[in-house]
Image (tube, grey):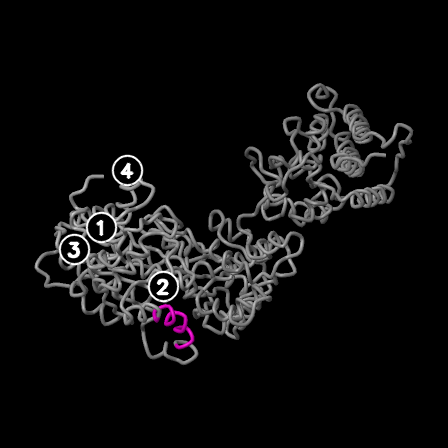
Amino acid sequence: MDRPAPDRWAREHLSVRLTALHRALRAAVERQAEITARLSRPDLVPYCVTDEQAAVLLEEADILAETLTEPDTPDAEADEKAGAEAEAEAERELRRRAAAGGATLPLDALAARFGLSRAEQDALLLVAAPELDPGYQRIYAYIVDNLNRRLPCVELLTAVGPDTPAARLARRRALGPAGPLRRYGLLRPHGDAPVDLARELVLAPGVFEYLLGWGGDPGLLGHDPGEVAGPEPHPPSPLLSPYLSPYLASDRLVRLGRALGTGDIDLAGLWGCPPGGQPDAARALARVAGLPLRTLAHDIEDDLRTAAALGALLWIPADELRGPPGGRSAAETALALLRSRVPVCLTGLAPWRPEGLLAARSYAELTLPVPGLDERRAMWSAALPGLGGTLLEDLAVRYRMSGRELRAVASVADAGARLAGNGRPEPIARHVAPAIATVTRGRGGSGVQSIVPRRTAADLVLPEAQSQQILEIASAFRSWPRIAETWGFARRSAHGGVKALFTGEPGTGKTMSAEIVTGMLGLELLKVDLSQVVSKWVGETEKNMEDAFRQAEESHAVLLFDEADALFGKRGEVKHGTDRYANLEVGYLLQRLEASEGLVILTSNLKDNIDPAFTRRFHFVIHFPRPGIPERRRLWRLAFPQQAPLGPDVDLDALSRLDMTGAGISAAARTAALAAADGGSTEIGMGHIVRGAARQFQREARLLRPGELGRYAALLGEED
């Protein structure tokens, strides 16, 4: 015999449950009949549903429930079960059959996903019943004694099933706005009602189809926007562990959470935490307090009422209150909190402390420090237990990730390990670096350009002293967290991170060196687009700069200011109003550069153009000279890929005597290759390269003299 389809099991389940509900409906009809028998008038019968009509409609509904499914085989006998125990046994048997077939009954799946009780499931089915048969609408109208109210309403759902006033009140509470059916949106209000008892309810889109087993995703059927769920990895994997930032388990946070749980305080502030880490901080506080956690979803007063009904802690990200005018109003939020005693957790980078609110509430706060090296090491170990040794230490040094980012990295790395393993997961350590790139890169905005490093240290062509300094930058950035935190240097200096200044003529390799350092660290390079950042409007440049620094910090990227003279120039005497604002911009950038914990690189054609106040704050100041003959010979060799067909007459020694920068040599090589290909040549000859060099000299407003080419001077006049 063929296995039944999933929708067949769903229909059988509805048949069993509706049979039980019909007994409750019949009891509700009988109660209403007793009432109407005492109040009935024969002259009104044509205008309302009569007892006889209700009985007939119930018989039709019974027939519908009994014939909702056909027997598994034509010879199977219909086994009508009477009584609640028989129906419960039928339901258990149906679950066993479905489980054996690898299926879950849709109603059971909804109940598990949204935490629905048996009574709430019955209410959901009563709302769904008119979709099966319109006759239910007239039954409902009869029970509420109003022919104009045929849709299921709160009054009907509380009347069907519960047989005592206390039970009906409990059902009504479950059907209120804070109950799971309406809170998750599985049931939605329809139309207006003078009182909540008369509120008509309808199914959310897709629920009816899902109940019948026609497919769908339970996660799309209902959603509570104010619910803050726990950080569970998905899909579950033995490689992933439940994650809680170890640094959030401090004694002070535990004391604060316990005070919230006992009611000693009802307003807590957690400050200094970046946006990505605030959800974990609020979860940790709620977990210690023993309270469910909710956040802002709709109107602040509605959010407070729902939190009060659920006995929850309301989390308010205070940074959102300082947003644009169209955002949440700080004044409106403060006024609502003044009238409420719902426990509230405030989080933000900077504190939000309205005096009136602090005076009216019982308030305590905690400044969350940035996770140190030891905490980051523990966080990485908790997120990816399989890591250890050098890799774990390197990740802790390079990345300051929030709990949400760490969980994303762990999930992506786990998926990559399972996919690459072809049935048997590979070691997850191999997939951590690509996972970090997936999670952190590509966040750049209009003010920055994302550059994925492609150059390596082998492409670095500089004198030995400068080459060694470039390599030292990467080593210093790796070592700084250990020096700052373990050795205590952070307490002696206000400067964070590593700052480097590259000076030299255009084309000498400043930008390429920044790319090489970034590649050595395995990070992303964000190049600031000065045309997008610098603004004539007062305050806009600082705002754009803050966005650039923030993007680099959130992406764990190296920030590059190319040709930074425009931003970091010398402050001058105030002679005009604009001079004052220009000096303010430089002062702001000075402070922001100090505060950055990342690697920031500035390039400038002229070192003297940079304000001395900036120069003093750089850990590395490297001057890039024009390349000498040994460097130029190597640059010419690197300018042509190994696959490029160089002619046997190419003389690199002669070319290295030309005074050119690395960028000029690369441009001349490309011009030569284009000329050779355009002329149909199978190789790049010396003549092509000489003419390419001459073109580059012209672009630089210089003249290539024949004497500089020696015996190849005649090639300048040759035609292709």
Q: Is mark 3 on a helix, strand or loop?
A: helix
x and y percentages locating residue 223 in the rendered image:
57, 45
Pointer 1 or 3: first along the chain: 1
Q: Distance between the residues labelled 4 and 3?
A: 25 Å
Q: Is mark 2 on a helix, strand or loop?
A: helix
Do the residues bearing badges 3 and 2 touch, measured as CB atoms within 8 Å?
no
The residue closer to the viewer here, 320 or 405, is: 405
Crowd tier of the residue under label 1, counting other residues whose Cα lies within 10 Å: few below 14, some 14–19, many 20 or above: some
Foreground label between 4 and 1: 4
Which amino acid type is marked by label 3?
A: Gly
Q: Name the residue under label 3.
A: 710
Viewer can see residue 525: yes
Q: What residue type is labelled 2?
A: Val
Mark 3 or 2: in front is 3
Query: Which callout, 4 or 3, points at the residue further toward the start of the chain?
Result: 4
Give residue 535's mark.
1
- Residue 517 is marked as 2
- Label 1 secondary element: loop
Quick one: label 4 or label 1, which is nearer the N terminus? 1
**Pointer 4: what residue?**
679
Q: Which of marks 1 and 3 is in front?
A: 3
Give the distance between the C-alpha atoms of the residues marked 1 and 2, in whole angstroms: 30 Å
Q: Is residue 476 one of those drawn in magenta?
A: yes
Q: What residue type is labelled 4?
A: Gly
Nearer the observer: mark 1 or 2; the answer is 2
Q: Is residue 343 visible?
A: no
Label 3 neighbour load within 10 Å: few <14, some 14-19, many 20+? few
Which portion, as a residue range, is magenta? 472-483
